[in-house]
Amino acid sequence: MSSQIDHLLNETRRFAPSPAFAAEAVGTAELYERAAADREGFWADQARDLLHWHTPFTEVLDWSNPPFARWFADGELNVAYNCLDRHVESGIGDRAALLWEGENGDERRVTYAELTDEVKRLANVLTGLGIGTGDRVAIYLPMIPEAVAAMLACARVGAIHSVVFGGFSADSLRSRIDDAGARLVITADGGYRKGKVSPLKPAVDLALADRNGLGAQETVEHVLVVARGGNAVDWTEGRDLWWHDVVPAASAEHEAQPFPAENPLYILYTSGTTGKPKGILHTSGGYLTQATFTNKVVHDIHPETDVYWCTADIGWVTGHSYVVYGPLANGATQVLYEGTPDTPHPGRWWEIVEKYGVTVLYTAPTAIRSFMKIGRAVPQKFDLSSLRLLGSVGEPINPEAWMWYRGVIGAESAPIVDTWWQTETGAIMISALPGVTETKPGSAQVALPGISVDVVDEDGKHVGNGNGGLLVITEPWPSMLRGIWGDPERFKETYWEKFAAQGYYFAGDGARLDDDGDVWLLGRVDDVMNVSGHRLSTAEIESALVGNDAVAEAAVVGASDETTGQAVVAFVIVKESYLAEHSPEGLAGTLRLWVGEQIGPIARPRDIYIVGELPKTRSGKIMRRLLRDVAEGREVGDTTTLADTSVMSIISAQVK
Ligand code: WT7
């Protein structure tokens, strides 16, 4: 990490927004002053200005029972009404909400009026199925307009959605359905990925079946299926329903009921430092306030003229806050794309930018680095002159990728906002304001107005400019997680225990303050990896590996990777009986696929090394730091605390 720090410290390039951009920008320097003068008052103003409240709130923040925050708690609103009906009522129903592009070339323009109509019908269907306030609905869909409608329909009736990324396996889906106790699953026959239909309903059938000694899933009563892929599916009469049979037939009359601001909106599972994913819980009023505010000022949304495109899948928090809730509450027009960036050709994204005249693009460093690898000739074949603002999210963006993004995609003029946040924070926390901040390639820079962060040492003391430490959030914020579903103790331990004395939220990231006090993110400091901007837990992959009959023990590390940021590298001890009968290459191949089946293809290790031993301390803890050295091809660091100091030289030799 020290070479990375040196490298970043030498980064002196600065890019101020053009006067023309600054003059039209939504976010202004004055926001910082207002927020600094009265933080809670500032958020109350945003909540009032940006949202419609059925019942206005009189309380702002209730922090009487930390770390369980309540924001705007005596106010009432309907999240879906804020994203839909109010736009129709204000006369912009004909505006495109979604410009949908299927991977196979299908397209649909969905206006606010049409999306409202669809959500009202679906809300009636949900009510008819007995889904109401507080019920959990699992959503396992491709990137199609129905996915957006499904989330909003849950919000409309006060139900809690749990979106599960379509790339997760049947087993991952099952554990998430079980943990939340979902009563309904909304899925599709399949969706297009890499030129083929990737099946979804078959995975739902598997997830609900009696497998792995779990018994048949018991809480799910119905499965609502969108016809998208056209692939054949099995059908369970009485349980399964086709969307096209029930939604168009339902009434389009549905009045949005108000719900308390703290009504749960969704659960989203994310990996932590143990094998069990955490169900991050978000609620309504505070979440929607911050998602809407940040989309507006960071993405500089001018809803009348912008064509915004956030490339994230709705299965991740970025898709929740910056495809669904933020942009729709702002009345924006956005592109929704179903497929992969390189299908059917490597310029597909840039073709979409040209076709729809995309003005604001929000994507991940890993995507930028893959385009960089292919070369500028591909994007240069397309007219990208509509792009006026670029965003980055999910992992640190290295200055090279940042400069390429600005130069090749942004024509040397579009500001770049590098946005730091997490599933837990619900919305952007640290980012430049594109019309205000002089940007620095590689730095997320400053806390947004109304947000307060610090970089501290192990004792919770501010490290001071020019120093590195741990990133903390020092004051509660409106879109903060309200807990971990079903596990309040884990919520306290994971985020609040480390700096309990100071009352800080510990983000799990290392960071550094430069001489101006700007924040440079340095990656996770816990056993969480970041692969292509997606969070994976070493423990979760290890437990999948040891779940295979051939495996005696496994250790997983995140090793740096040129394209994906980090890559999963596994060190596996195989049982003698298997070693005798299989080649190490064969075993490694089998185990890669196994992890893909257990968790999902994103978790498949890049490398699997079959080794004889693992480096452990005297108390039996695996020293992942040393394995990371091996995985990254470095000289192995200090081994003096190992129980057996010769282990590392054996492993290094085996890996070579
Ligand atoms: C972790 C959160 C936020 C949505 C996508 C990921 C890393 C996120 C940045 C950034 C450096 C970043 C952090 C964070 N991260 N954005 N701009 N610069 N690192 O959400 O899966 O909850 O992961 O992603 O390590 O803790 P997530």
Image (tube, grey):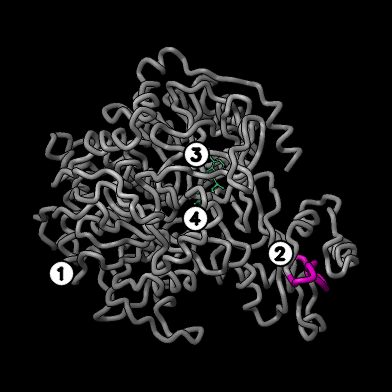
- Label 2, label 3: how far apart the Cα atoms are: 34 Å
The picture places residue 7, in percent across and down from the top left corner, at 72, 32
Who is closer to the viewer here, 36 or 519?
36
Q: Is residue 618 above or below residue 63?
A: below
Amino acid identity at mark 3? Val
Query: Which residue is found at the position 41% from the left and 55% from the top?
Result: 67
Which label belongs to residue 570? 2
Categorize mark 1 by other alpha carbons within 10 Å: few (<14), some (14-19), many (20+).
Answer: few
For the residues marked 1 and 2, what is the alpha-carbon distance in whole angstroms? 48 Å
Asked if residue 60 can be seen in this view, the reply is yes
Q: Quadrant of residue 476?
A: top left
Neighbour class for label 4 at 10 Å: few (<14), some, many (≥20)? many
- On screen, residue 472 versus residue 218, left or right, reads right
Q: Does the rendering let one see residue 357?
A: no
Q: Is residue 23 magenta?
A: no
Residues in magenta, as a range: 609-620
Dot 1 or dot 2, earlier in sequence: 1
Residue, x 62% and y 30% (percent of image)?
A: 465
Mark 1 to mark 4: distance in Å? 41 Å
Q: Earlier in the sequence, mark 3 or mark 1?
A: 1
- Distance from the alpha carbon under mark 3 to that under mark 1: 45 Å
Q: Which residue is mark 1?
A: 128
Q: Which residue carries the number 3 mark?
A: 453
Mark closest to the chain's N terminus, 2 or 4: 4
Q: Which is nearer the N-term, disc 3 or disc 4?
A: 3
Image mark for residue 496: 4
What is the three-letter code of the residue carrying label 4?
Trp
